[in-house]
Image: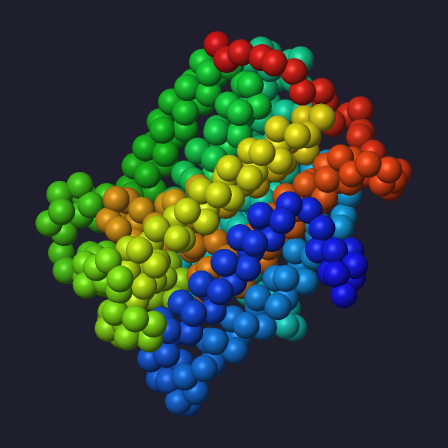
Amino acid sequence: MKTVFGGLFKGDRVVWGLIVVFMIYSLLAVYSSSVSLAFSRHGGDTTFFLKTQAMMLIFCLFIITVTHHLPYKIYSSLAGTILFVAIILLIITLLFPVRINEASRWIMIPGTGFMIQTSDLAKVALVIYLARMLSQNQGNLHDFKLMTRIMIVPVAIVCALIMPENLSTAVMIFGMSLIIMFIGRMPFKYIMAWLGIAVAAIIIFALVLDLATENNRVSVWKSRIENYVSGEGNKDADYQANQAKIAIATGGLIGKAPGNSVQRNMLPQSNSDFIFAIIIEEYGLLFGALPVLFVYLILLFRGVAIARKCETAFPAFLVLGLTIMLVTQAMINMAVAVGLFPVTGQTLPMISWGRTSMVVSSFSLGAILGVSRIINARAAEGEEIDPDEKEDPGDGLIYEGVHE
């Protein structure tokens, strides 16, 4: 039994342990936060979301298991193709969207009834692409024109396609991309220049969109930012944030106990965007907020540890990029729940109820485990490495460098 388990689940044991913790919190929190919604919308079946989330987590475990057995060179060779497909899907979303909760961020897969949020797919595709480009161009990082063309232009295209309907995700992806580039030893002056250009572009875009059309997302952006800065926004605009604050304040140190949340009945998106507030309300600071926060921080530390063991650049940048993507999204979700950020609509990776986000998060964890599996195999004395998993010279060498 031990041999079968060890042969099926390889890679970093700590990361596997974190996945188990994610799944436990996900089942408990999704079930508790969705009871009222399930009762009202699904014929009194209060376990509807519990059952669907359980099936989704089983599927996610399958994705992680399969992905972590794949050689990471596959992602390197297909990086450009994956990004191109993601951009096409973003264009389709912009032209033929499915509208949910006054936002057009999804497309329907014909004949399946299954919807996907294409920005989540584009996010992971961009991480893979940036990891590949950084690994191939460690000797060209000081060529501003080249780096702008092969690094920033793809990032700008992805963000520009997402921004009209989802500014927060576009900003998060751009910021995440700059962090990955900084880790990849991109000169700091280039990063600041691109950041300045991006801020100016967002302001110009918002002004043009606001003047050109009456019904647009600019008013929503302005309202959320103004309400957050002033703290005196109207009740309707601040409803979600206020309900989340009530949930957190009444949770206290030890919470109200599982299943005793009151705000789940008043808080929209209680099982997705604001699930962290429900976790704190039921489990408190000691058993809810801090453990969830520490789980993501441990994931960050393990990602860095795995990357440091890589002998070439691509797997190191891939692991760091995917880890940063997951942890950044988690931190933004938690910051919104506690009132540190304006409402953004980001889910809590591997915990919130969802579909595309869960699949993307599972793939990311599987890829991280895949790199650690190969590292562990190299470290194991006398263990043979599959020829397809040997280092690729095109992955780039890791060397010490400095930022300017």
- Is residue 247 toward the left or the right of residue 365 in the image? left
| Residue lying at 41% horizontally and 28% vertically, measured from the top left | 198
| Residue lying at 46% horizontally and 46% vertically, measured from the top left | 296
- 179 or 158, which lies in front? 179
- Is residue 290 toward the left or the right of residue 127 in the image? left
66 vs 54: above or below: above
17 vs 128: above or below: below
Q: Quadrant of the N terminus?
A: bottom right
- 211 or 65, which lies in front? 65
- Is residue 239 toward the left or the right of residue 80 in the image? left
Q: Does residue 180 appear anywhere in the picture? A: yes
Q: Does residue 327 appear anywhere in the picture? A: no
- Is residue 113 toward the left or the right of residue 65 in the image? left
* Residue 186 in picture, x, y percent from top left: 54, 18
* Residue 302 in picture, x, y percent from top left: 55, 39
* Residue 55 in picture, x, y percent from top left: 58, 73
* Residue 284 in picture, x, y percent from top left: 28, 60
| Residue lying at 41% horizontally and 25% vertically, measured from the top left | 195
In the rendered image, which quarter is residue 297 located in?
A: top left
- 164 or 52, which lies in front? 52
186 vs 132: above or below: above
